[in-house]
């Protein structure tokens, strides 16, 4: 069975690839991806903004792991990819979506889910909550250098999930029968406020980390100062605004049910990734 993995150099895709040696890796720069992942994969040139790369990458592929690149807000490129997957005879798409997407029609994930369903390709929707790993990637520098979390989430709670758990579910969906035409809500087992997150980070790192809770407008200004592109900033702002209104606190049972164990806790994640903030 040939599995094509998109986003393999990102948080979730990297963990999925680690669990599927021999998979085909779709990469804008195959040699750079090889340097990160090693030689256990079949690398093919692929770029969401260059649709002519789709058909060669999908040749002979049976299952596709699809991740929306953060910079893609409009979904025409992904629509073209889904059409190419239809033409190539792909038998299943596993799509990394967003928890609560059915109530958030303005986020790209909603449109992508609709495109996949209308294609007729059997699909598994992994509707994930906020990634713990956002804190050691997107927010790493402010934690490491400024000892703060500048996120406009108010005092709301978030049911964070470790991307390693998402990847394990994705691997099961890609390799086992019985997951086609299923939707899974994936969260951790605890809903934490960012004040509690800052406290845990402080204890693990041995350095006080403050949660500053900026306004939405201050957050936007800060992201632009950091050089974040507008589309990425807009999506982040939307998601944190939803969080502020309590829409990220849902704890879902699917992660534990599918993995047969409790999800990774935030404290365990912080201990495992401690080196990122030192």
Image (cartoon, helix red, strand yellow):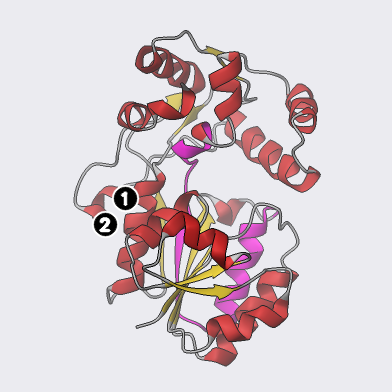
Q: Residue at x 32, y 61 (%)?
A: 19
Task: Please give the range of residues in magenta.
Answer: 106-135
Q: Is residue 195 left or right of residue 254?
A: right
State whether residue 114 is above or below residue 55.
above
Q: From the viewer's side, name the closer residue of 242 and 145.
A: 145
For the residue pair 250 and 258, the one nearer the viewer reads as: 258
When the figure is inspected, residue 12 is found, relative to residue 246, above or below; the finding is below
Q: Is residue 98 left or right of residue 152?
A: left
The residue positioned 39% from the left and 54% from the top of the image is 15
33 up-or-down from 121: above or below: above
What residue do we see at 48% from left, 49% from top? Answer: 11
In magenta stretch: residue 125: yes
Q: On the image, which quarter does residue 17 sit in?
A: bottom left
Residue 266 lies, in percent from the top left, at: 36, 30
At x 55%, y 29%, the residue is 140
- Name the residue that disc number 1 marks: 255
Residue 272 placement (x, y as % from top left): 33, 32
Q: Return the residue at label 2.
A: 258
The answer to whether the residues at label 1 and label 2 have Cβ atoms under 8 Å apart is yes
The one nearer the camera, 189 or 228, is 228
């Amino acid at each position: 069975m040939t599995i094509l993995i998109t986003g393999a150099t990102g948080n979730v895709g990297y963990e999925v690839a680690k669990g599927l040696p021999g998979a085909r890796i779709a990469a804008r720069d195959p040699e750079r991806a090889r340097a990160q992942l090693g030689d256990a994969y079949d690398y093919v040139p692929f770029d969401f903004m260059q649709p002519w790369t789709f058909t060669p990458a999908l040749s002979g592929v049976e299952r596709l792991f699809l991740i929306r690149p953060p910079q893609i807000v409009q979904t025409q490129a992904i629509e073209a990819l889904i059409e190419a997957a239809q033409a190539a005879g792909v038998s299943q798409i596993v799509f990394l979506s967003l928890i609560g997407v059915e109530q958030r029609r303005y986020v790209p994930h909603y449109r992508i889910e609709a495109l996949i369903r209308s294609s007729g390709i059997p699909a598994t929707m992994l509707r994930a909550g906020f990634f713990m790993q956002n804190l050691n990637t997107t927010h790493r520098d402010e934690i490491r250098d400024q000892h703060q979390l500048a996120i406009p989430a108010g005092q709301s709670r978030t049911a964070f999930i470790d991307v390693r758990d998402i990847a394990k579910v994705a691997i099961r969906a890609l390799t086992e029968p019985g997951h086609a035409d299923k939707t899974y809500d994936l969260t951790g087992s605890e809903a934490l406020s960012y004040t509690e997150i800052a406290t845990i980070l402080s204890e693990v790192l041995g350095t006080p980390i403050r949660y500053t809770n900026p306004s939405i407008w201050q957050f936007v200004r800060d992201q632009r100062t950091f050089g974040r592109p507008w589309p990425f900033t807009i999506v982040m702002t939307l998601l944190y605004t939803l969080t502020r209104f309590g829409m990220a606190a849902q704890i879902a049972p699917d992660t534990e049910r599918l993995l047969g164990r409790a999800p990774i806790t935030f404290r365990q994640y912080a201990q495992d990734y401690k080196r990122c903030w030192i």
